[in-house]
Image (cartoon, grey):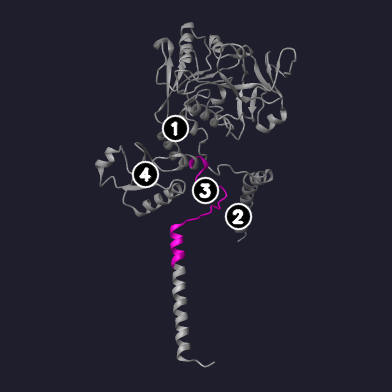
């Protein structure tokens, strides 16, 4: 083929157009890569992805969120924080991050209440709080606190040997209280004999399994509180009502003195339960308190909470919702629990039975719904059992629901990932044999052989 000047010109033009199009495509790819980000977390525990609770609370925030990090002028610290905050920006685009050196601007640090370098000030609308790190659990807790329109004051009645949120013993409630305090709840023990009233700013009152009788005057104060639209959480153990019979009638309930038992040995073996009085609840009602619970909840030594049949034709205007029920294999034992107990059709009540009852009503002079929860057990909240199954989630949901914070009910506690190492039994036994027998024996034999070889030299 003969090359002419026009052919050379045409080829050069093609080459120029090729390079222009090539550079244009490269530039567009670079622009797309910088503007739009798509990442896939392929780690086994999704360590590079925000947890579901964090995603939920970020998606519900409709106020400006600003993070002010009081850190030194260190590029490595800034890059690490920006990388971490970028994970949050995937679910809330308008998060602002600002770096302030507390050594160069001590006046601003003091005004924001910063005590030392490394703290981060979180601003949500006109509210603010500070954290020591922007780890997920810290962020979930502080955002829940800032999302509330006001702190939630929870009044725990005392003076009758009730459970206390300050008690750190095995039967105390300190572990639950610590979790809830980080989410914006405040707890106040309250003695009715000393004050003769209930604080008006209380979100709700807790009667936590009393062991001594209430005086009639104290019961009258609680009745007036309920009549005026107050919210209540009543935790009751099997046995006497300890002077709260009028409260039972006011709520239209029938609370039995017996103890719930379950003879399902297969279920007990699967859950690691040995005593028949430890009731496991697996199926939950479609109520905000329990609808998102995935695991079982454990209630040791519980009793049944039933609606009084007379309330159907009486003046009560409560709406009743059973939300915790036992399995069909359970029953309410009326006798003593000794030895091998069996169901007695003449004296016992067969299951399934209700452990938890939610009551709601709207008063004429109130704009909000009055809420009351009665549960035939208190052990599930105690330090001994709060870590079992979904006990902590259930307790947190109860407090949020009674505090009128329905939007925070489904926000669970962030759990640490990869905290359990699950191995087959033969691997465990082999490892134990190797480290306890094989390795010491091997070292001993090696030492003896070396000693004998040296003696022969």
The image position of residue 153, as x and y in percent, is 42, 24
Separation (CA) of disc 3 from disc 4: 22 Å
Query: Dot 4: what SS?
Result: strand
Residue labelled with disc 1: 183
Q: Which residue is mark 3?
A: 47
Q: Residue at x 59, y 11 (%)?
A: 314
Residue position for label 2: 451
CA separation in Å, label 3 and label 2: 51 Å
Question: Which label belongs to residue 67?
Answer: 4
Dot 4: few (<14), some (14–19), or many (≥20) neighbours within 10 Å?
some
Q: Which residues are magenta?
A: 27-54
Q: Is residue 303 left or right of residue 405?
A: right
Task: Bin the neighbour count of mark 1 within 10 Å (Cα to Cα): few under 14, some 14-19, many 20 and up.
Answer: many
In the rendered image, the residue lying farthest to the bottom is 2
- Mark 2–mark 4 Cα distance, whole angstroms, equals 66 Å
Q: Quadrant of the N terminus?
A: bottom right
Residue 388, horizontal then vertical, whole percent: 58, 31
């Amino acid at each position: 083929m003969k090359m002419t000047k026009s052919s050379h010109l045409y080829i050069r033009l093609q080459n120029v157009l090729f390079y222009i199009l090539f550079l244009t495509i490269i530039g567009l790819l670079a622009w797309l890569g910088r503007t739009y980000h798509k990442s896939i977390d392929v780690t086994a525990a999704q360590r590079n992805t925000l947890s579901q609770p964090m995603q939920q609370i970020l998606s519900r925030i409709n106020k400006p969120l600003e993070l002010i990090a009081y850190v030194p002028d260190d590029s490595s610290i800034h890059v690490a924080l920006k990388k971490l905050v970028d994970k949050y920006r995937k679910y809330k685009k308008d998060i602002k991050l600002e770096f302030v050196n507390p050594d160069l601007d001590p006046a601003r640090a003091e005004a924001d209440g910063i005590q030392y370098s490394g703290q981060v000030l979180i601003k949500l609308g006109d509210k603010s709080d500070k954290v020591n790190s922007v780890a997920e659990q810290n962020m979930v807790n502080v955002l829940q606190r800032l999302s509330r329109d006001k702190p939630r004051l929870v009044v725990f009645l005392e003076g009758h040997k009730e459970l206390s949120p300050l008690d750190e013993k095995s039967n105390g409630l300190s572990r639950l209280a610590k979790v809830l305090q980080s989410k914006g709840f405040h707890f106040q023990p309250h003695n009715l004999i000393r004050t003769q009233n209930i604080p008006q700013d209380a979100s709700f009152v807790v009667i936590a399994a009393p062991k001594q009788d209430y005086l009639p005057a104290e019961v009258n104060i609680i009745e007036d509180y309920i009549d005026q639209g107050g919210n209540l959480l009543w935790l009751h153990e099997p046995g006497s009502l300890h002077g709260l019979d009028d409260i039972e009638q006011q709520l239209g309930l029938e609370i039995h003195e017996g103890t719930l038992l379950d003879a399902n040995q297969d279920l007990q073996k699967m859950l690691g339960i040995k005593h028949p009085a430890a009731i496991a609840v697996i199926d939950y009602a479609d109520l905000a308190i329990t609808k998102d619970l995935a695991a079982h909840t454990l209630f040791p030594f519980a009793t049944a909470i039933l609606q009084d049949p007379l309330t159907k034709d009486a003046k009560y205007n409560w709406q009743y919702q059973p939300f915790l029920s036992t399995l069909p294999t359970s029953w309410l034992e009326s006798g003593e629990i000794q030895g091998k107990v069996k169901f007695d059709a003449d004296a016992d009540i067969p299951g399934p039975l209700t452990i938890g009852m939610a009551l709601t009503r709207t008063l004429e002079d109130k704009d909000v719904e009055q809420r009351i929860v009665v549960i035939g057990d208190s052990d599930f909240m105690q330090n001994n059992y709060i870590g079992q199954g979904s006990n902590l989630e259930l307790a947190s949901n109860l407090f949020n629901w009674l505090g009128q914070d329905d939007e925070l009910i489904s926000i669970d506690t962030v759990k640490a990932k990869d905290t359990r190492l699950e191995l087959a039994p033969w691997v465990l036994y082999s490892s134990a044999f190797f480290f306890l027998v094989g390795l010491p024996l091997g070292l001993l034999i090696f030492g003896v052989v070396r000693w004998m070889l040296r003696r022969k030299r």
